[in-house]
Image (cartoon, rainbow, N blue to C red):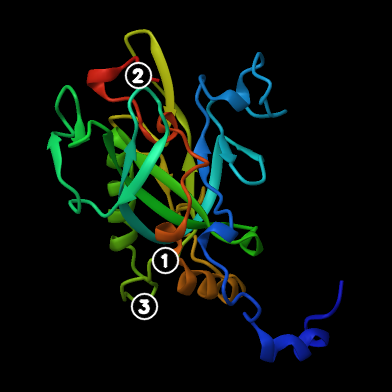
Amino acid sequence: MSDKNEMDYLGEFAGQGYEGLGAEDFIVPFLKILQKGSPVCDEANPNKIPGAKAGTFFNTLTKESYGKEITLIPLREVRLWLEWAPNMGGLKGKHTPGSIPTVGSAFGEEGLRTLSGNSISETMNFICLIAGHIEDGPIVFSVSSTGLRHGSFWNTMIKNTRLPNGKAAPYFACKWTLKIVPNAKNNFTWFHVGTKEKTEITNKNEKGEIQYITKEDFTGVLPSWEQSKMLVQRASFDALEERDVKAIEDKTSTEY
């Protein structure tokens, strides 16, 4: 591999050559929590991915499975409404919350819907880097429905984090470990980063020490953070299915 100093001649052209390219020219990877109904871990499905198992993290772009735990560096979070056609008919659009007319309620029997009858899922989309693989670029972790509880808890912990000098830490200051655990109701089991009682997300190691990013990490994190503002707005959510972002609600315990 070439020494970094040997590549200085490219420095003045950093970031150039992408003029005219739009969102359709790139694929934004998503970090999914595989469920028992996910095609990639169904032995009988032709789309089965070797090594993919229910209850693990999965990269929609590289098809890599990360196991039950992953350490992420969050860059920012963006809320979106995802619009789905009835009967798992696919994604029809994404919207800023409250920007389109709707009927019903997210907590009602029929949920929140557009005037045309499509369902709306409110999502929290965390744009992150995978610790140890910053060079792979951002990945989006989306949570919805009862998963919003875990997303809100994570945001709160991020906001409450302080640097050693007592100042408020930037959003991207820490490495956070997310752990998948099973949830169960009415003889049905699904997986998420926590249960109703506890969110399994922490920025502390086994010694109880906060995992701040290093100075070396920072050189890779900062460019991704600067580019992340519009990433979710430009991203295609076609890699997801409604079941991927819609966590099991108490009133629809068999929806998956």
Residue under label 2: 255
Compare residues 177 and 5 and report the one nearer the observer.
5
How far apart are labels 1 and 2 at the CA level? 32 Å
**Amino acid type of disc 3?**
Asn
Marked residue nearer the N-terminal end (1 or 2): 1
**Residue 50 percent location from the top left of the image:** 72, 28
Residue named by callout 1: 230
Callout in the foreground (1, 3): 1
- Residue at image coords 49%, 48%: 177
Contact check, label 2 and label 3, Cβ < 8 Å: no
Question: Amino acid type of disc 1?
Answer: Met
| Cα–Cα gap, marks 2 and 3 | 47 Å
Q: Are marks 1 and 3 in contact (CB under 8 Å)?
A: no
Three-letter amino acid code of the residue under disc 2: Glu
Q: Residue furthest top?
A: 187
Give the image location of residue 175, x and y in percent: 49, 58
Element under disc 3: loop
Residue 92 visible somewhere in the drawing: yes
The answer, for residue 209, to whether it is visible in the render is: no
Residue, disc 3 = 165
Pick the front one: 1 or 62: 62
